[in-house]
Amino acid sequence: MTEAARELRVAMVGYGFMGAAHSQGWRVAPRFFDLAAEPVMATIVGRDRDRVEAARRKFGWQRAETDWRRVVEDPDIDIVDICSPGASHAEIAIAALDAGKHVLCEKPLANTVAEAEAMVAAAERAASRGVRSMVGFSYRRVPAIGYARRLVQEGRLGAIRQVRALYLQDWLSDENGPMTWRLDKEAAGSGSLGDIGAHAIDLVEHLTGSRLESVSGTLATFVEERPLLGETVGLSGTASTERGRVTVDDAAWFTARLDGGAAAGAIGAFEATRYATGRKNALRIELSGSRGAIAFDLEAMNELQFYDATAPAGEQGFTRIIVTEPEHPYMANWWPTGHAIGYEHAFSHQIKDFVDAVTGGADPEPSFADGLHIQRVLAAVEASAGSGSAWTPTA
Amino acid sequence: MTEAARELRVAMVGYGFMGAAHSQGWRVAPRFFDLAAEPVMATIVGRDRDRVEAARRKFGWQRAETDWRRVVEDPDIDIVDICSPGASHAEIAIAALDAGKHVLCEKPLANTVAEAEAMVAAAERAASRGVRSMVGFSYRRVPAIGYARRLVQEGRLGAIRQVRALYLQDWLSDENGPMTWRLDKEAAGSGSLGDIGAHAIDLVEHLTGSRLESVSGTLATFVEERPLLGETVGLSGTASTERGRVTVDDAAWFTARLDGGAAAGAIGAFEATRYATGRKNALRIELSGSRGAIAFDLEAMNELQFYDATAPAGEQGFTRIIVTEPEHPYMANWWPTGHAIGYEHAFSHQIKDFVDAVTGGADPEPSFADGLHIQRVLAAVEASAGSGSAWTPTA
Amino acid sequence: MTEAARELRVAMVGYGFMGAAHSQGWRVAPRFFDLAAEPVMATIVGRDRDRVEAARRKFGWQRAETDWRRVVEDPDIDIVDICSPGASHAEIAIAALDAGKHVLCEKPLANTVAEAEAMVAAAERAASRGVRSMVGFSYRRVPAIGYARRLVQEGRLGAIRQVRALYLQDWLSDENGPMTWRLDKEAAGSGSLGDIGAHAIDLVEHLTGSRLESVSGTLATFVEERPLLGETVGLSGTASTERGRVTVDDAAWFTARLDGGAAAGAIGAFEATRYATGRKNALRIELSGSRGAIAFDLEAMNELQFYDATAPAGEQGFTRIIVTEPEHPYMANWWPTGHAIGYEHAFSHQIKDFVDAVTGGADPEPSFADGLHIQRVLAAVEASAGSGSAWTPTA
Amino acid sequence: MTEAARELRVAMVGYGFMGAAHSQGWRVAPRFFDLAAEPVMATIVGRDRDRVEAARRKFGWQRAETDWRRVVEDPDIDIVDICSPGASHAEIAIAALDAGKHVLCEKPLANTVAEAEAMVAAAERAASRGVRSMVGFSYRRVPAIGYARRLVQEGRLGAIRQVRALYLQDWLSDENGPMTWRLDKEAAGSGSLGDIGAHAIDLVEHLTGSRLESVSGTLATFVEERPLLGETVGLSGTASTERGRVTVDDAAWFTARLDGGAAAGAIGAFEATRYATGRKNALRIELSGSRGAIAFDLEAMNELQFYDATAPAGEQGFTRIIVTEPEHPYMANWWPTGHAIGYEHAFSHQIKDFVDAVTGGADPEPSFADGLHIQRVLAAVEASAGSGSAWTPTA
């Protein structure tokens, strides 16, 4: 088989929001990046036959299946991309890895630490056979984040002492908004903390090379009951009443001590919320160091604020870098200077990096072990919140 | 032929920056919008066989051709999408329209008013036979622009009295940057004025429904000679010298009187430049009306600033609308609230609108006649600049 | 005594940064606001004769004294304005109040809860005799804050569920910066927490009408030793060594539960730091409610961001209100629309309000009791930080 | 007379907006800056006895007079500060200078070029006798402007090729707003052009050291009649009708060629308007050079945006400098880092500079000759606008 003809046949499990985003990644990445193998959007998997067939047509996959086991067993499939709800991740990923498929798994890695641990074990078994696994913290692939990381690694921030990491959304701020499965602990595992707080944790660790070693946390549920929609499937036992009980956190705050990396000894302040009225998707990271600082807000994702504390005194200030230059990660492959990219581009970058790892024989990042670590941080925050915010180790 | 099976076979001429952008539009639009026919990326056309074949593979077209006449004559082609340099537009578009192909033609419509007039005549002939034509002012399809237009149409700005429209880039601000074909009048037609000033004119007219009826303009060339690169193809007569002569405008300014629409009687101040140090792609539009104002900057393309002068006095201010809500044009088909789109999305929206027009039997906008009008405005600015900024009618 | 002739003779204790700011308040307030009595800058008090005389000339006071008891005993003095270090507040304020002088006392009210309690007792005794007292949380008098409070009171934010309050400075981010008395616990009482965190607490309570009822806090000292300057007066026992020991917090974080007012049941996240590289004086408050939100940053003190969640869906966004309209608190007395005021104007407003209360026979706010409450919150944060961030009541 | 005892006795003519601002300057400057002589606010002059007496009390002057000739003749007066309407400037200034008084004259220097020429002649006569004169373009004294100028002088912008200078206000955007004397040519001389456009011209010339040598301009009056208020004094011949005729420009645009200084050969685009809906006091200057750029907006007057085109490619961006550092002009005498100053501070700086010049025996800037030049630019813009925007020399 010639280099040019090499293909990687992909099966994707799930067809919701993440299914759409991952499909766009598989579709677009090879059109802008030179990949050593051409991904083929072979099979999409979903439980409902009509809906998965509709998704197949919509997203442009070749075939549709209703049982994920079929693709795990399919010798023509090289990669399994898992976009289904978190509770299903462990079973699918372990089976796929054991069957020799490379696995890209959406975050969070799993709904529990135990599941995540089993997944890491499977990933390690697989790695020894050259089978790759990665967890999909896509925001790592936003160019502004990549460039910020480079600045940290070059020592431009010096010793980082403080971290602020907030993920602010507001889609629950109206107390009359409906109950959904995302607000039910059985279905969703956790609320803001796991859904969006996990991104904040991962980005801080990715940017600094440090780890959150202990946390003091608080969780809150502001609105404890919400009106049920007509369709209440998935909300156990609430179908016949008029209001559903919210059993996950609406918001989470925690303080963390960091260890290792550029932020060794730093303290981080985290918040994840769906009640930050007016903030739509404001994932904000600020790193304050002895020589400089960076600030990022996902609501302006093509920008990075950089403060150089070594510049002449009168000239210091946050520089608004428009992260669309060829010098910036991934950007040389897109449009000319000043032309913005969007949310989904991070998924194309994720595919590029994943395919590079698969074809290049390297282990991609973030690994399942990284995903497990995030899971442990989330569990530690919950444990701390359950014991009066007592400081709790993450390992 | 069933509805679901209906296809539109597309041929695209050109494979440069615009070829990449249009390809992405054809590729992505049907995956996010429900189109009455599925576009098929059939044939890409370019003069250089090796390069067009490389582009075919890269962009994902089925076939490559080196002569645009082949696709004009091909009975299987429904649509011709013209992304080649401006000097070639008239010949290709007229032939394609006369052959019954729907035509999408990149802006500027042509390099001269005379060519544009011939294209409009062909478009009118074609329209009478149900063949559609559109010129590709893609920024009309940025959701923030679409929403701003809606606000204007709803009267939220009242009588618009002033317009500010600047398109600021800086890629020439280094005087040691090389000579390119874009700085040669024979090859490029004009400089900043036609390349980016045309967008500013089109957006103002699109937003307000008004027309620039007369202009007073100034052009300047700040750096008159630039170092030649080794490859000087396309720069007539300069190949043997060490520096090339810049024969187009580096920057253009003009004041315009508007007529008709929401800005009847207004005065607009325009600037287009490649010397605005630090401004990468700042297409800025501000409309000041008796009841409100809007401000837009392409460098923050997911935002629209809206000022409601009818709000209570103490509460007035520019509201930064993050244009990612389902209520905003095109956005219901993309990602959840707060998730940004990028530059290329406007091309997907352009394809959606063009396909809707073709399948729905409507004439799309902007028409070739609109493109001709822009051409006349550009010509009037040049004429005014050539006669001491004397006010010059555009028709 | 005629209205025009009525005077209030003022003595001010202290001549540092706050002495300069208060002097400007006394000097300027009567020139822009109609006061029922004309303040006379009678006597300035400081321990060092030469320096207080220099300050007298510089600031424009009539007389200088070196012993504060002289002004407390002076029958011609109506008001004592205390700007000396916190450790001296209680003794001076109690003596002045008992002597029948109205007292304006800089924040923090005292360095300890016990001192603050004694001051409250004195203030209550005095109030029964018509003698007024106020603590100088000057930021309450920033017009944007006053206007935000009005929006909260009018219910424009609905039920406030979340508060973010950060006071970010960076003057310690260079670890080679010198040791100063502000970093010595004996001299300064506390570090960031009491110096700037107190402002954040007061503003949140002022804006919402709510009280912090319990807190979970963390304190950190990032740089534990700093080079001593030649003059080490006030640093106990460190004069002969080369490095001084930092004994206060460099940064403080705490989560708080709020009770009463518009933010009953809300949770607030607070941070006070002198290590936020690049942030010079960023006192940032964000209130997230069921019907709206406000955001304020002291680095842009003439602006208020207001989000109206009841506006039409497509039009929602943070509105940048330039708080210079006649409708905004205090602003009708300054300059035309759009003309900024600065930091010191809050001190003129403070004098206006204090004089209004004194001449109008009303008790001004914030009262000494309010100041005591803040002190208790600070003490609770320190207690919580000392016991592993355990939740600690503030009363 | 000892140094410490030296006084400068000031008389101020006028008590409107500028009278209040200048009074604040005289009052505050000596309290924050070390001046070689102490200004004494001796006499305020106004034609209406009651109003000038009220202003005297309000602003804190020692005496009030109703005839400006009295202060010109008063041997105890050292300085005459002219804040009366433009039509009165020439007569007062010439008399005062001829009487040996130093003169600070508000801008515009005069309402006509002829008057301004006579004033320059008087200023030159006076200068030969050591008598100083200055015109009050106060925005030169905004620290961000001073710092920007320093960057230009140090060559940090390289060759400046483009200038954008807009002064945007919106107080006329409501067409039902009343007629005022400012809209009557006889009373006001001109409209936006002279009132605010003059500031834009002066700042550009001050920042660059260049001069506008020719202009192509356009003027417009959008609303030609406005409702008369009950009191129509000063509007000749309109008292008995219900609507008054607007006889000045509502907005002005002009393009200018610059000569000399850092912007030799540059082209500037200017706009002055009272119809920029939502813009309250937006004096915006942007200078684009071969090595860098600066951008300033008076609505955020404590900030300066600086772009360094010589920084590493990936790090370039506009740096938001908060202009409150000791390194910035005038700021070491105010508050700590990060504490904003306001509009009126420029007037204190103006007094400081004027007093420094008077006591130091230097000619202050901007001189009456500078003021005359601005007047000639304004006249050239009007002449150009009157002749179809034909390019018109300014000298």
Image (cartoon, coloured by chain):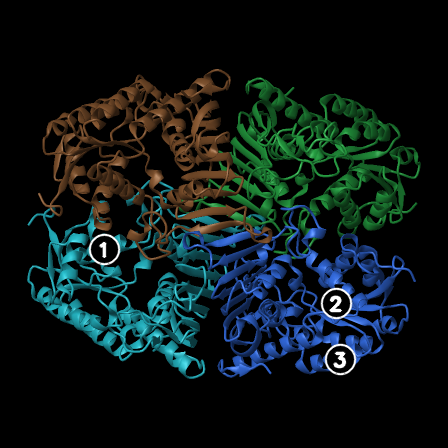
Chain colours: A cyan, B brown, C blue, D green
Real-space CA distance between mark 3 and mark 1, rounded to the nearest whole angstrom: 70 Å
Q: Is residue D178 above or below residue C26?
A: above
Q: Position of residue A156 (x, y in %)?
A: 44, 55
- Kindly identify which residue carries mark 2: C83
Q: Position of residue A295 (x, y in %)?
A: 45, 57
Chain to which mark 3 belongs: C
Are there few (<14), some (14-19), or many (20+) residues within 10 Å of tag 2?
A: many
Count of numbered badges drawn on the protein: 3
- In the rendered view, does B138 fall on the left or right side of A215? left
Real-space CA distance between mark 2 and mark 3, rounded to the nearest whole angstrom: 21 Å
User: Which of the two residues, B308 or C222, is positioned nearer the viewer here?
Assistant: B308
Three-letter amino acid code at the position of disc 2: Cys
Chain to which mark 1 belongs: A
- Indicate the secondary structure of the residue bearing disc 3: helix
- Kindly identify which residue carries mark 1: A351
User: Which of the two residues, D178 or A371, is positioned nearer the viewer here?
Assistant: D178
Three-letter amino acid code at the position of disc 3: Glu
- Indicate the secondary structure of the residue bearing disc 1: helix
- Indicate the secondary structure of the residue bearing disc 2: loop
